[in-house]
Image: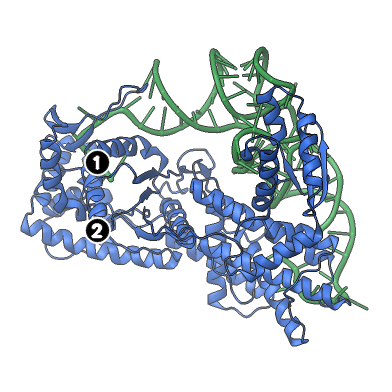
Amino acid sequence: MTSLAGKLSEIVGKAFEEQGLPAELGAVRVSDRPDLCQFQCNGAMAAAKVAKKNPREIAQGLVDLLSRNDVFAKVEIAGPGFINLDVADEYLQDHLGGVSADDRAGVPVHDLDETVILDYGGPNIAKPMHVGHLRSSIIGDSLRRILKFTGYKTIGDVHMGDWGTPMGMILSELDIRGHDGPVTMEQLAEIYPQAAADCKADPERMEQARAATKKLQDGDEEYTKRWRQFIDISVEGMKKNFDALGVHFDEWKGEADAHQFIAPMIEALKAEGITAIDDGALIIDVTQPDDKKEMPPLILLKSDGAVMYSTTDMGTIVDRVKSHDPDKIIYIVDQRQSLHFEQLFRAARKGGLVCEDVELTFAGFGTMNGKDGKPFKTRAGGVMRLEDLISDAVQKARERLKEVGLQDEFDIAQKVALAAIKFADLQNQRQSDYVFDLFKMTSFEGKTGPYLLYQAVRIQSLLKKASDQGFEAGKDFVLQDADKPLALLLAELPDHFENTVKNYTPHVLCDYAYKLAQAFSSFYGNCHILSEEDEHVRASRLALCAQTRKQLIMVLDVLGIEVPERM
RNA sequence: GGUCCCGUAGCUCAACCGGAUAGAGCAACUGCCUUCUAAGCAGUAGGUUGCAGGUUCGAGUCCUGCCGGGAUCGCCA
């Protein structure tokens, strides 16, 4: 199944073909002038440009053909050569009947049995999770849900930072302090920043950290034991955070898990003759003849022989190909790492780590800035902890629940709070930076997650009342003029889904969900539903409500947002 | 300095392949809870899309130049 615009595109495309024009030009889209028509096709103007003909003449030929089709209630030419279309009520009603009978609301299934690995979250060992981790986690988890719904086999991997120099910083700091035995999360949270600051300030201290890193990577028994311990304790904390966010992973791997693949990989790359030694480091040149910009080489081994993130990222690709044979690997990582990923992808292809037909995508996200336009910091200069943000939002939600006379239910407050946080983040375009605003993120009014929940909950309540009165939603639609905006919007879902999947942009679905909720709220305010006298109209409107609820829940679900029973 | 990204209403952001009258939310103002949840609805106001050219029937979107901001440019991730 497809969207209504999709169906119309096919019909209009055929008309183009009959006129000896390419079918693609028959693409129909939702009109951006709803006052004039429901749908528009701009292809006649494009065709005219190529054929150097009068666009209105071309449009006229198409209009003559299309007017004979009883799918359309109106076909007319406007302006320079727009073809404006209205569908017949019966056609819209039939289409909607099909949508409501489909448990996917018309969203097609991608059934090629393809596997996609998503790399998101990326928390670091020994650092408490802060709001900076939100974007990767939330966008990644949402993309995982979206692709899963679309029909891919999905694997979400947290890909922890657990094998680089920060590990050496911690281990050497423990040595300096003479610390023996296990460390607690609290100790770690104090030790790591101290070590990092010292290393930054003192090159000699940094050398110690590098040496410790190398020693760990070489398998030193004592270091490995300690490392294992603080990894375990860190992961425990992370899981708590991700659980609180409702962010799911299928794999809890990290950089260290790539270690076993690295030595053989490097041997193979050397054998291929694509490596070189430069300043003591082992590198792969990834420049290409048509490069306009400078492209630094990818470093496989540092001059001291230790591995770094470029190495583990390569090894991780080997691991992923071996264990899952993926068709796509998508990285949801800070935009600022784009150069690294370009180098990585080039090196991986050059070294034959992945086949040509495996898609490697860097789905970068923008930086979370403060109101000053610089990367977000709290007033104290630190970063806001994730758990503080969540408890803040939950607290506000509980107060709100009390205000509106619902007894304080933690479950509802939790759902409202998470909806607010997640929607506030996801509605931003993935690629661009955005301003972190605590107030906005914990707001429940306007274009927010709770607004969407509220509309869904209203529908639930309405449907319950209806069934209490013995009214049922109909299977057929009998649309009045006041019902049509909502009905037409319901028929758009597949297009927005497609757009989101193509570009990995959840904000497109956020926007759609919001528009749908808005259209419903307007409909709800303008139309009698339960008190509607005509039973066919009433049943049809109940069906519209039910369908709106279904689609809202469906979209919110792939955004990682749960709807409470009431609020 | 090289490369890349951004500049849209007072603020935060949309605008699918170049389409018609550039849309939302917040903040401001005016109405609406005696029919279904006011976390809401209806409405008013707010714009030379940074500036100057160009391409096009048509430009926020493409091209050139300029101004302003940001990111990045080998052993950190």
Read off the residue under disc 1.
A310
Same chain? Circles 1 and 2: yes
Instruction: Point out residue A257 in the picture as x, y percentages from the top left corner.
Output: 20, 56
Residue type at numbered disc 1: Ser
Tell me if mark 2 has few (under 14), some (14-19) or many (20+) residues whose alpha carbon lies within 10 angstroms of its own: few
Name the one closer to the observer, A299 or A529.
Answer: A529
Residue B4 in which image quadrant: top left
Q: Which secondary structure, mark 1?
A: helix
User: Which label is found at residue A38?
Assistant: none
| Quarter placement of the C terminus of chain A | bottom right
In green, which chain? B
**Residue at the disc numbered 2:** A323
Quadrant hosting residue A521 = bottom right
Instruction: Report the side of A162 relative to A279 (left or right).
Output: right
Residue A376, above or below A423: above
For badge 2, the amino acid type reads Ser
SS category of the residue bearing label 2: helix
Q: Which mark is nearer the camera, 1 or 2?
A: 2
Q: Chain of mark 1?
A: A
Q: Vertically, is A123 above or below A85? A: below
Query: How far across and down, in percent of the image, does residue A560 sit?
Result: 50, 63
Task: Say which residue appears at 61% left-offset and 39% top-offset.
Answer: A24
Chain blue in the figure, letter: A
Disc 2 sits on a residue from what chain? A
